[in-house]
Image (spheres, rainbow, N blue to C red):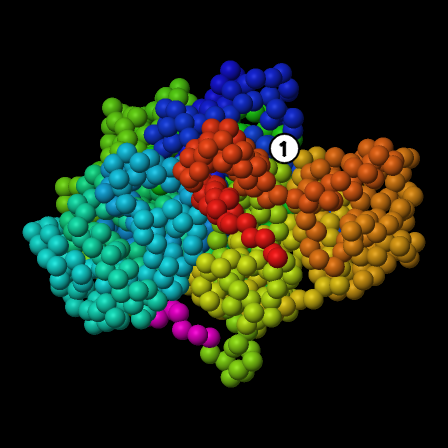
C-alpha cells in the first residue's frame, strides 16, 4: 500500500486524510504508526488539505494501550477470560434469544455511536428493528444532534441541512451560535477566517463564554445561558418590523408565518425585554440585528451550545424561522447550518440510527413501515418509536430492558446522571460492549466484551455535516482478532436464524443494499431529499474507489459532486411542499436555583460543560497521546474571581462539586478565568474515571431533556460547589506506589514514554513514603522493591525508589500545586540514578513549566514569549507583526489556527510589558 485516502475519525467536518507508507514495520502491529505519514487530502472538498491538531496525530492513536484483541467473557467478579468468536457469538445470540422469548422483543436494546460506519449502523438497525422487532435502538447522536434533527423535521419535513461549507466563505456575515468552532471544528473556522481576510466577512459569536472563537469575533454577544431563543425570536420580529422579510417567498413557499409572529411577539420581544432576558446591552442587540438585516448573505451556524439544551429544538427552529422570513434557504452564502459533532452522526441518522426513525429518513407511518418491511422481507418490523437514550437506560434501571448491546460508545461517561447509568448497567441482566479497548468506564460493566476494529482497521462510509459521503478505508491489518462491527452483528443475526437476510460478505454489499433501499424510497416518496439511488448498482471496484460525493445522488453521473444546496427551488419535503414556520415560545431556563436552605443556594453555580481543543469525547482515542494531553492534563473548574471569592475558592486549589443525588463529590482544580460570567463555571466534558479518580462532569448533570428531541440539557446545570482542602499534593512518575484509595485527587497524564499521576490527599500519611514498609501508602500490600531515598528541595518533598541503580519511582509533593516539566522528569525514569541525576532533577524543578499552546507543533508559551522578545528587539513593535514572525519561525497557529487567540493574547502581554515604564524607587 503506497498510499491510502480515508477520512478523519473525529468531528463532523469529515476531513479527507491521505496516509502514505514510509517504513517497513509490519502492518497491524502497534509500531505500525511509525511506518506511515499522514496529511490532509487536498482533493477532499471538506478540508482541501487542512487538518487540525487532532487530525495531524491520528497515527498516534494506533498505539492504543490495552487494545482489546480477543472476545472476553466475565468469569468471576471483575475478572474476564478470553474466548473464541464462535463462543462469544453463541453467548450473545442465545442470551438475546432467551430474553426475547421470556420478556418480548422490547426487553432488548442497542445503543450505537457516531463513531460507527454507516454500514455498521445499517446492519444494527436492520437486525433490531427489522428482525428482532424492537425499536429500542438509539445512538449517542441523541446527545449532540437530535435537537437539530427535530428542528429540521418540523421546518423542512425531513432531517436535512440545506447548505454547505462553501456558504461560510460566501457569506457577508457568519453567525456562530453555541459553537466554539475554532476548537471544535478548526478547519471550518479557518475557512471563515480566510473569508474575512479575502472579502471582509463579519463574524458574530453568540456564546456565554469568551471562547477562542469569541475572542476573534467582530461582535461577541455574551448572553445568559439558555436565552438565545429569545434573542432569535426578537430577531424575527425586528426583520418583520423593518420590512426586511420576503413577503412573496413567505406566501408562496411557507406556512404558519402569521401565527408564529404573533406567538413570538406575545413572548415579549421589545429590546428592553430581550436585554433583560439575555443580559445583553441594548446597543449590542441593535448592532447584531442591524448586521443581520443589512447583509444580503447571512449564515447562522449552530452546534452543541444550542442543541444541548432543554430549549434546543425551539432555538433551532427560531433560527430557521429567521431565514425562512428572509427567503434565503438554499441560496449561496445563506441559511442555517448545523455543525455535527461526530464523524458519522449524519450517516447514522440516514440509516435510522435514532429510535424515532426508520432507514432512509422514514418514519413509522403505515406506508413508510410497509415499504421497509417489504424490502427487508420481514413481518417483524417494529411499528412504533423506541426508547431514546435516557429513556433506554432508565428502563434498564427499572428492569424493563433486560439485555443491551453497546457499540463504540461510553455511556457511563457521556450520558447525564452517571449514577443512574451505572445503576442501569448493574441492574441489566446481560450487557454486551463492542469497543477497541477494555479500559473504558462502560466496559467495566460488560458481561461480554467484543473487540471492534478501530480507525485504520475498518472500512466503510461516513457522511459529514454538509451531506458528503466519503470512504473510510483500512490501511493496516486488524490487530489480534478484532472484527468489523457489522460482521459481529451479522454473525449474531445468523445465529438467531436470519441467515439469508444477513449473509453480507463485505461492507460494499451492505452499502449496495442500503442504496437500493434508498432508490425504492425515492420512487415512492419523491418529495424526500435524501437519496443515494444513483449508487444502487455500484460494482465492488466502484465502491472501493468511491470519491467524496454530496447527496442527494439520484444517478451515477452525480459522483464527485459538491456544494449542492437543497430547497433552493422553494419546494420542501413536507406534505404540502411548503416549509413550516414553527412556534418557539420562550420559557426561562436561567432562573436562580430554588432552595429552602439559603446557605445551600449561596454556594451554587450554573455549570457549563464542553470540549477542550485537543481531546475527543471520553478520551478513549486521544487520552493516551502525549501531544494532546499536554495542554489540558487535569479537570479544571473555570470561574471568575468574584464567584471564586463568594464560594471560598482559591486558584490552584481544589473545588468539590455536588448535587443532591451524588454521594461522592466531583473534584476539579480551580482556575480563574475572568471572562466567565458571575455565578457560572465551566468544566471539560472529557474526563472519566479511566483518567480521573472522581470521574466526569456528568456525575453532576441531571437527565432533564428537551421535550421535542429528548436531548439532554448538558449546558446549563445548577450545582453546589465548595472548597476542598488537601494537606499535600504532587506528582508521581514511574512504577506506581501511592495508594489511590487514600487520595482525593488522582489524575493520569500521558507523557512521552510513560504516564504520570497528579495526586493529592487530605491526610499527610496518604502520600508519605517515609514509612513504606507499613504498606499504608502502597497501591497494594506488596512491598517496595528497591532502595528509598527522600529529601527536601524548595519546600518540596522528593522521594525516589531506586532498584539496581536505576530510578523506578519518583514522587514529588508539597503544599501547593507542582509546576514542572513532566516530560523532562519522565526521561529520568528507568535511567541510572546518581549525583548527576539529582542535579538534573533539581535543575528541572527550578525551571518550572510552561504550558503547551500549539498542539500541532508542541510550542509552549515560554517558546512564544522568548521569540517575541527577540522579534521586539529586532523592530517588530505591534501584535500582528509579532504573530506573523512567530508563525513563520515557530509555525504555531499557522497549521490549523485553533491557538491563534492564545498567540494574540501572548503578543498583547509582551507588548504591554515592553511599554510599561521603568520606575525607580528612591
- Confirm whether the magenta stretch covers residue 591: yes
**Numbered range of the magenta stretch:** 587-593
Residue at horizontal 36%, vertical 62%? 223
Left or right: where 807 falls relative to 634: right
Place of residue 410 in the rendered image (x, y in percent of width and height, measured from the top left)? 55, 50
Instruction: Return the residue at label 1.
Output: 63
In which quadrant will I find the C terminus?
bottom right
Residue at horizontal 52%, vertical 61%? 639
Residue 261 or residue 28, whichever sits in front: 261
Place of residue 2 in the rendered image (x, y in percent of width and height, measured from the top left)? 51, 15
- Furthest residue to the left? 248
Q: Quadrant of residue 311?
A: bottom left
How many marks overall?
A: 1
Residue 388 or residue 728, whichever sits in front: 728
Residue at horizontal 83%, vertical 39%? 838
* Main SS category, magenta section: loop
- Confirm whether the magenta stretch covers residue 844: no
Q: Quadrant of residue 723?
A: bottom right
Amino acid at each position: 500500500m503506497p498510499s491510502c485516502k480515508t477520512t478523519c475519525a473525529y468531528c463532523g467536518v469529515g476531513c479527507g486524510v491521505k496516509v502514505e507508507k514510509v517504513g517497513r514495520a509490519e502492518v497491524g502491529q502497534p509500531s505500525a504508526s511509525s511506518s506511515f505519514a499522514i496529511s490532509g487530502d487536498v482533493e477532499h472538498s471538506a478540508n482541501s488539505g487542512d487538518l487540525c491538531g487532532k487530525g495531524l496525530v491520528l497515527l498516534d492513536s494506533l498505539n492504543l494501550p490495552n487494545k482489546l484483541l480477543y472476545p472476553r467473557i466475565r468469569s468471576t467478579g471483575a475478572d474476564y477470560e478470553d474466548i473464541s468468536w464462535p463462543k462469544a457469538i453463541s453467548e450473545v445470540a442465545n442470551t438475546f434469544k432467551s430474553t426475547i422469548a421470556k420478556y418480548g422483543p422490547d426487553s432488548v436494546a442497542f445503543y450505537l455511536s457516531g463513531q460507527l460506519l454507516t454500514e455498521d449502523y445499517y446492519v444494527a438497525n436492520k437486525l433490531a428493528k427489522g428482525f428482532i422487532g424492537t425499536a429500542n435502538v438509539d445512538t449517542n447522536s441523541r446527545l449532540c444532534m437530535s435537537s437539530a434533527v427535530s428542528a429540521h423535521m418540523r421546518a423542512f419535513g425531513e432531517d436535512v441541512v440545506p447548505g454547505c461549507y462553501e456558504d461560510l466563505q460566501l457569506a457577508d456575515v457568519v453567525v456562530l451560535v453555541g459553537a466554539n468552532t475554532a476548537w471544535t471544528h478548526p478547519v471550518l473556522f479557518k475557512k471563515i477566517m480566510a473569508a474575512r481576510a479575502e472579502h471582509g466577512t463579519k463574524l458574530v459569536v453568540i456564546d456565554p463564554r469568551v471562547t477562542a472563537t469569541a475572542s476573534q469575533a467582530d461582535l461577541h454577544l455574551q448572553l445568559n445561558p439558555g436565552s438565545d431563543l429569545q434573542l432569535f425570536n426578537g430577531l424575527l420580529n425586528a426583520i418583520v418590523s423593518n420590512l426586511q422579510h420576503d413577503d412573496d417567498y413567505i406566501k408562496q413557499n411557507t406556512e404558519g408565518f402569521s401565527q408564529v409572529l404573533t406567538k413570538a411577539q406575545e413572548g415579549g420581544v421589545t429590546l428592553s425585554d430581550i436585554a433583560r432576558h439575555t443580559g445583553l446591552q441594548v446597543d449590542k442587540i441593535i448592532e447584531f440585528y442591524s448586521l443581520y438585516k443589512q447583509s444580503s448573505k447571512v449564515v447562522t451556524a449552530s452546534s452543541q451550545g444550542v442543541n444541548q439544551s432543554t430549549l434546543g429544538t425551539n432555538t433551532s427552529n427560531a433560527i430557521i424561522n429567521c431565514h425562512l422570513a428572509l427567503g434565503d434557504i438554499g441560496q449561496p452564502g445563506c441559511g442555517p447550518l448545523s455543525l455535527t459533532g461526530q464523524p458519522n452522526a449524519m450517516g447514522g441518522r440516514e440509516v435510522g440510527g435514532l429510535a424515532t426513525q426508520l432507514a432512509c429518513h422514514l418514519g413509522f407511518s403505515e406506508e413508510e413501515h410497509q415499504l421497509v418491511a417489504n424490502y427487508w422481507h420481514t413481518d417483524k418490523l417494529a411499528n412504533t418509536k423506541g426508547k431514546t437514550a435516557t429513556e433506554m437506560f432508565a428502563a434498564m434501571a427499572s428492569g424493563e430492558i433486560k439485555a443491551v448491546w453497546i457499540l463504540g460508545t461510553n455511556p457511563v461517561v457521556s450520558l447525564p446522571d452517571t449514577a443512574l447509568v451505572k445503576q442501569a448497567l448493574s441492574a441489566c441482566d446481560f450487557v454486551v460492549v463492542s469497543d477497541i479497548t477494555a479500559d473504558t468506564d462502560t466496559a467495566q460493566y460488560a458481561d461480554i466484551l467484543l473487540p471492534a476494529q478501530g480507525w485504520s482497521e475498518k472500512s466503510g462510509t461516513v457522511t459529514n455535516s454538509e451531506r458528503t459521503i466519503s470512504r473510510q478505508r483500512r490501511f493496516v491489518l486488524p490487530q489480534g482478532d478484532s472484527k468489523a462491527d457489522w460482521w459481529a452483528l451479522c454473525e449474531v443475526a445468523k445465529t438467531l436464524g436470519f441467515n439469508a437476510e444477513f449473509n453480507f460478505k463485505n461492507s460494499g454489499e451492505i452499502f449496495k443494499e442500503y442504496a437500493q433501499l434508498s432508490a425504492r424510497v425515492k420512487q415512492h416518496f419523491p418529495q424526500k431529499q435524501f437519496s443515494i439511488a444513483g449508487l444502487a448498482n455500484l460494482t465492488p471496484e466502484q465502491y472501493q474507489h468511491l470519491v467524496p460525493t454530496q447527496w442527494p445522488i439520484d444517478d451515477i453521473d452525480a459522483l464527485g459532486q459538491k456544494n449542492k444546496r437543497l430547497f433552493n427551488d422553494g419546494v420542501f419535503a413536507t406534505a404540502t411542499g411548503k416549509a413550516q414556520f414553527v412556534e418557539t415560545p420562550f420559557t426561562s431556563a436561567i432562573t436562580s436555583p430554588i432552595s429552602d436552605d439559603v446557605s445551600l443556594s449561596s454556594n451554587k453555580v450554573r455549570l457549563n460543560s464542553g470540549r477542550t481543543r485537543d481531546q475527543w469525547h471520553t478520551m478513549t482515542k486521544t487520552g493516551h497521546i502525549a501531544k494532546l494531553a499536554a495542554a489540558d492534563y487535569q479537570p479544571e473548574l473555570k470561574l471568575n474571581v468574584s464567584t471564586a471569592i463568594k464560594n471560598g475558592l482559591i486558584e490552584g486549589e481544589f473545588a468539590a462539586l455536588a448535587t443532591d443525588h451524588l454521594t461522592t463529590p466531583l473534584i476539579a482544580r480551580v482556575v480563574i478565568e475572568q471572562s466567565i460570567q458571575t455565578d457560572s463555571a465551566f468544566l471539560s466534558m472529557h474526563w472519566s474515571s479511566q483518567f480521573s479518580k472522581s470521574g466526569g462532569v456528568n456525575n453532576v448533570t441531571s437527565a432533564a431533556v428537551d421535550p421535542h428531541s429528548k436531548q439532554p440539557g448538558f449546558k446549563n446545570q445548577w450545582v453546589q460547589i465548595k472548597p476542598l482542602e488537601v494537606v499535600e499534593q504532587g506528582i508521581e512518575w514511574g512504577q506506581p506506589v501511592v495508594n489511590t484509595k487514600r487520595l482525593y485527587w488522582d489524575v493520569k497524564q500521558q507523557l512521552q514514554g510513560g504516564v504520570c499521576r497528579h495526586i493529592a490527599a487530605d491526610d499527610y500519611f496518604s502520600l508519605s513514603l517515609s514509612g513504606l514498609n507499613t504498606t499504608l501508602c502502597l497501591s497494594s500490600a506488596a512491598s517496595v522493591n528497591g532502595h528509598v531515598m527522600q529529601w527536601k528541595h524548595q519546600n518540596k518533598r522528593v522521594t525516589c525508589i531506586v532498584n539496581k541503580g536505576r530510578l523506578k519511582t519518583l514522587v514529588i509533593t508539597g503544599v501547593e500545586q507542582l509546576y514542572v516539566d513532566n516530560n523532562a522528569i519522565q526521561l529520568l525514569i528507568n535511567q541510572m540514578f546518581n549525583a548527576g541525576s539529582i542535579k538534573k532533577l533539581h535543575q528541572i524543578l527550578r525551571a518550572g513549566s510552561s504550558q503547551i499552546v500549539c498542539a500541532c507543533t508542541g510550542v509552549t508559551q515560554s517558546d512564544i514569549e522568548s521569540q517575541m522578545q527577540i522579534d521586539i528587539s529586532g523592530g517588530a513593535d505591534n501584535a500582528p507583526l509579532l504573530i506573523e514572525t512567530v508563525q513563520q519561525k515557530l509555525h504555531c497557529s499557522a497549521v490549523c489556527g485553533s491557538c491563534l487567540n492564545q498567540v494574540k493574547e501572548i503578543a498583547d502581554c509582551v507588548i504591554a510589558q515592553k511599554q510599561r515604564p521603568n520606575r525607580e524607587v528612591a
